[in-house]
Image (cartoon, rainbow, N blue to C red):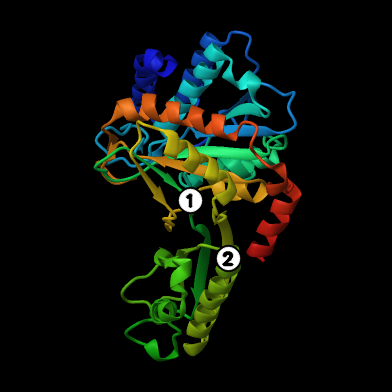
Amino acid sequence: MIFKEQYSEIHEIAKMIFANPELGYKEYKTKQTVVDFLKKVNPPIELEEFSKTGLKTRLSDDKPFTIAFIAELDAVYAPSHQWSDKSTGAAHNCGHYTQVAIALALYNYFIQTGAHQKYDFNLAFIFVPAEEYLDLAYRDELLAKGEISYYGGKPEAMKLGVFDDIDVGICVHAMGGEFPERTIEVNCDLAGFLYKKYTFHGKATHAGFDPFSAKNAYSMSTLFNVALGLARQQLKDSEMVRINPIVMESDMSTNVVPNQITVGSDLRTQSVEYMKEAAAKMDDAAKGSAMALQGDVTIKTQMGYLPFKQDRYLTEFVASAFEKNQEITAIRKDTPISAAGDIGDLSYMFPCIQIGYSGFSGTIHGDDFIDIDPAYIFEIFPRFLSQVFEEMNGSIDQAKLYKRSYKDYEELIQSINE
């Protein structure tokens, strides 16, 4: 009954967050909304703040291991979205506002019922900023000031030790598109990605008077683009590789043969190992294209997020809860996509799952994305999540879990950048 009784309030909070979208590391209104609710339902709550807008609280700390329920605070930069903030361009067309509301619904359920007290694990709630990899100029400023070390909120929290006492992570995420029935999704693996910047160097001359002694940097970049296109046949289908080269910087004019141009591209793969292999292929294509036209190329690599392989053992508890549930009628399984998220980085440290939920219309990150089944999202789905926790209670074999340190993670990222 708790979820039905609190539905109206939770729905109103979701609408408030939706109407006030904020970009990463700027989610001050959203943070305050969360704090106000948590303190209202549990006045003596202890809150740990991190990364400007991040929040963490624990319901208990006397059990042998801890499960964290993780929600993301930020919006997407989408100024053309109908309900975007016209001053910042932020819009909640990725569904993070529903994650926050779902987390609050769960938290209030545990406070009101005390159900967590019988669990053989601790429960923590963590609200993380800056999941979306965007607004990078602002984040570059924060990096330069030493206020953050990572663009992504979860890697930043990892560095700060926020997850040091966590053993399992549970996230949820909106599913794009409309579904004929209320649906959950499990084992939707995500790609990892990195950014490559290729600056081609040539020799500028007058395009009319003396093109003969020039070395055309733009032509090198064109040859590089063709090479990438031809190389796609040699990239494994199973890795769902995505490459999207664009011209980022150039001072070209029509009467001067260009001597410098920068091409940037993301590179998405399903595994770290193949990410390195595909990156080497791209680098060779750039070097060969520059050499073919007697130029040179400077290559820079910037890590994005790691691939996310959902923990199949933990997913078994979600599937078990679904089989016993009478309100959700469909489940999707093993549907990998080439989208990415910083949950991949977190899952390197310990096992994580991300449960998808329907109830939306439109395309995620699109101008038409919005929730259309609030009763499912804010009442039925949180109730289902409480059933997942019930399934986990007394049943998790800790021998099937793993734990790595932030130092291990840092070494991996360094090896990719090199």
Q: Nearer the viewer, residue 14 or 377?
A: 377
- Residue occupied by mark 1: 187
Image quadrant where one finds the C terminus: bottom right
Residue 118, numbered circle: none
* Residue drawn at the location 37% of the way across and 70% of the way down: 252
Q: Position of residue 198 (x, y in %)?
A: 51, 70
Q: Nearer the viewer, residue 358 or 270?
A: 358
Quadrant position of residue 90 = top left
Label 2 amino acid? Answer: Lys
Image quadrant where one finds the N terminus: top left
Residue 300, numbered circle: 2
Report the label total.
2
The answer to whether residue 171 is above or below residue 238 is above
Mark 1 vs 2: CB contact within 8 A: no
Q: Nearer the viewer, residue 44 or 230?
A: 44
Q: Is residue 189 left or right of residue 55?
A: left
Between circles 1 and 2, the one closer to the viewer is: 1
- Choose the circle earlier in sequence order: 1 or 2: 1
Q: Position of residue 9 (x, y in %)?
A: 38, 14
Q: Secondary structure at mark 1?
A: loop
Q: Position of residue 391 (x, y in %)?
A: 55, 33
